[in-house]
Image: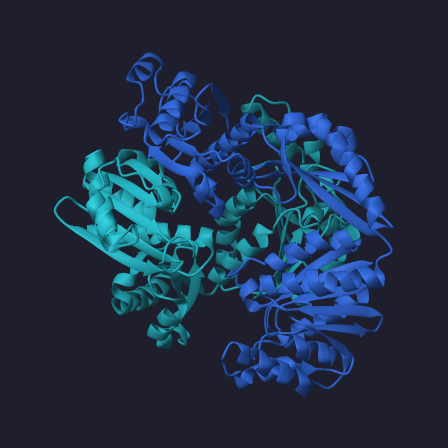
Chain colours: A cyan, B blue
């Protein structure tokens, strides 16, 4: 089926907000086997919206709109669809009652303007909004399905996943697309592309390759008439890619590096302390993105390459002999911070962000890990600006930590 | 003039990348007095692109396209415009020579596929690309101007600011729009809206209010026939808003809090150390986003509320008497970290991110600042999830630090 998305709102045309809804729907439609041919953005202008709806219905089988379902004068999606269908709008009193009850559960009176959101036309089915007051509309017009969803992304996405996507799957999809993502770190997009070349050219499952902040992702998607068969196809390719890419794969689907680290440390009742020299807390910041970090991450020191503090127990002889930017210092810093905070593991990151920091090449990152009996150090190099190198240093530190802990 | 934007690329329709170009152009067009009526996204499909170009030319005065100017088979923008204009494509040999010279300066041979980017039609003017190999096209067709720019945002934006925007201003704009942004922190959008209400309703200058991660921004824009007059109008309103919003305004236009702090500390040859209890390095991470941080930011400690390390000189009596989550502890932590690292200023941030951290309400943030002769403490409360509260705690710490230092 040919699909089309229309995003509605003058704020989008003024560049005041970025259209997250169209990108979200664009990523979801292939999972239902729908081909997205056009995305259009139009302001809160009824005549222009009717024009674009007319065009969309003439060239597509299913049209999704987001926005313009609010309670104010500006919200003209319902009016435009009513005019397109040449139907008269009326107020559905049972919806008004539902709205009032909903406001009452929050101990609030419903503003009268909300009544507008109970507008219906004879050919529309009302789609409940689990997250807000604006219901969606599902209209079949002239051989085309028009599905209107609210603009706030959280409301739109909940309505999509809970109600609209399952209903489309049931009514229109003779094929299912199932996908799974493998997350890698340490290879460039070109290198990974080389290794997986034959998979990237295959038709079913397809494999896509995407550069993300936390590494390169491989998305495997298979199409079939049954979910089981699609899953089986994906599972087979995923297993092959896993053996092909080996230790470069650190996770899949919703995994995050900080989440995997938390799982390992909490599961094994371990604790962690870190020292970051020149990476400005990027690692600490990433580690503490999850509340679970409280139960294993004890302390971090954020230091400056030029005036490194050695009072936490750093052996000055190592520094004097090898310099700050050395694997020896990375190991020693990891050991010292572990001893200082009596944790199971100590980790150090030393980052060279600009040419003037030291003799080392900008983008050089040293990582030290010490578990009390064994210490390891790694040297890595990353492209990018200051903020990107900081972030990549943190990702690579967690990536190496995970490998060592397994 | 009615304007329209067409974003070209199948990857946009698959949700693989977010369309930054359309949002960028949407924010730039009002500055030239152009009214953006539609944004459309279309894949790398020549027939569909021709359809949408035809429609765009029939309803708009000026059409901007981005993407599809690369060297591969997929790149079909030139071909589509040629077919729209019913003109024949030829290769401009002088462009090919320029390309070869450009590759030579990088000691590279030009891949033969790049010759495609030297394609022209009789009615197109070639627009130089200061950042890449794909030149733009400027075509006047049937009373409509079609301007095609490359897809990579850095190439597109440079071509826009250096060449296209000035040329449009010169050829088509009888009015100039000048804007300036004031950045505030500490007031909600509703509170700031209340204070500035009469300005928000004014027509020239207009004032827009935008919630951003670093606070609420007020954008003042004036339209006039001369830049001087537009600037004067903006300047007057900016001055009035400054006196109205007082100390809530921390900066304007391209200012960042970390940049202002760096300016103050470096200008006055001061140094800074921080301790973050429970905000996981968010403050250190923000402070170190600029390379200048190296010359004043000495050290940060990232601590965990549950197992706070007192060895850096924290007075245990204060902790015992008032608890960790207290302004007294915030002051004491700021003093202790200042003493420990012998810096001019010590700053502490204590954040309550979840209900279980302590008795305090989640979102509570305490800030302590000590300059050796005087210490201050602030209690703030922020909405949001864990990551938002961490970020807002860092922003508010820098905001208070800036105020104290001035």
The residue drawn where x is 40% and y is 52% is A357
Q: Nearer the viewer, residue A69 or B257?
A: B257
Measured as percent of width and height from the top left, residue A146 is found at 64, 55
Residue B316 visible in rendering = yes
On the rendered structure, is A167 left or right of A64? left
Q: Is residue A62 above or below residue B90?
A: above
Measured as percent of width and height from the top left, residue B199 is found at 77, 33
Q: Is residue A107 above or below residue B384?
A: above
Q: Is residue A356 above or below residue A240?
A: above
Q: Nearer the viewer, residue B354 or A64?
A: B354
Measured as percent of width and height from the top left, residue B41 is found at 63, 63
The residue drawn where x is 49% and y is 60% is A32
On the rendered structure, is B139 left or right of A110? right
The residue drawn where x is 43% and y is 54% is A356
Locate the N terminus of chain A and report the quarter of the image it occupies: bottom right
Residue B91 visible in rendering = no
> As drawn, which residue projects farthest toward the top?
B321
Q: Quadrant of residue A144?
A: bottom right
Q: Quadrant of residue A274?
A: top left
> As drawn, which residue projects farthest toward the left?
A373
Q: Nearer the viewer, residue B291 or B19?
A: B291
Labels in figure, total: 0
Q: Is residue A338 above or below residue A406?
A: above
């Amino acid at each position: 089926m040919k699909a089309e998305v229309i995003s509605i709102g003058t704020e989008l045309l003024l560049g005041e907000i970025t259209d997250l809804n169209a990108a979200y729907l664009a990523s979801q439609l292939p999972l239902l086997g729908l081909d997205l041919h056009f995305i259009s953005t139009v302001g809160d202008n009824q005549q222009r919206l009717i024009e674009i709806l007319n065009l969309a219905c003439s060239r597509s089988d299913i049209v999704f709109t987001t926005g313009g379902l609010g309670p104010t004068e500006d919200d003209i999606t319902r009016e435009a669809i009513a005019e397109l269908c040449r139907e008269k709008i009326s107020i559905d009193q049972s919806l008004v009652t539902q709205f009032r009850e909903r406001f009452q559960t929050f101990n609030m009176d419903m503003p009268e303007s909300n009544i507008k959101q109970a507008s219906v036309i004879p050919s529309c089915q009302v789609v409940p909004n689990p997250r807000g007051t604006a219901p969606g509309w599902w209209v079949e017009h002239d051989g085309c399905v028009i599905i209107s969803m609210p603009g706030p992304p959280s409301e739109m996405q909940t309505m999509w996943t809970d109600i609209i996507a399952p209903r489309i799957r049931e009514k229109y999809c003779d094929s299912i697309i199932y996908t799974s993502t493998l997350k890698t770190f340490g290879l460039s997009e070109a290198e990974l592309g080389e290794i997986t070349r034959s998979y990237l050219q295959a038709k079913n499952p397809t494999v896509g390759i995407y550069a993300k902040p936390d590494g390169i992702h491989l998305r495997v998607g298979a199409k079939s008439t049954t979910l089981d068969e699609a899953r089986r196809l994906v599972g087979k390719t995923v297993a092959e890619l896993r053996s092909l890419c080996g230790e470069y794969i650190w996770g899949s689907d919703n995994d995050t590096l900080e989440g995997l680290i938390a799982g390992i440390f909490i599961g094994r009742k371990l604790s962690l302390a870190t020292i970051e020299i020149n990476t400005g807390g990027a690692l600490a910041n990433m580690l503490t993105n999850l509340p679970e970090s409280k139960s294993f991450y004890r302390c971090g020191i954020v230091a400056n390459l030029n005036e490194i503090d050695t009072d936490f127990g750093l052996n000055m002889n190592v520094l004097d002999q090898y310099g700050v930017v050395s694997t020896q210092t990375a190991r020693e810093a990891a050991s010292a911070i572990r001893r200082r905070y009596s944790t199971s593991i100590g980790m150090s990151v030393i980052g060279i962000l600009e040419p003037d920091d030291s003799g080392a090449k900008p983008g050089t990152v040293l990582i030290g890990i010490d578990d009390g009996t064994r210490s390891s150090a790694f040297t890595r190099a990353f492209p990018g600006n200051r903020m990107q190198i900081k972030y990549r240093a943190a990702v690579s530190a967690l990536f190496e930590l995970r490998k060592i802990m397994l």
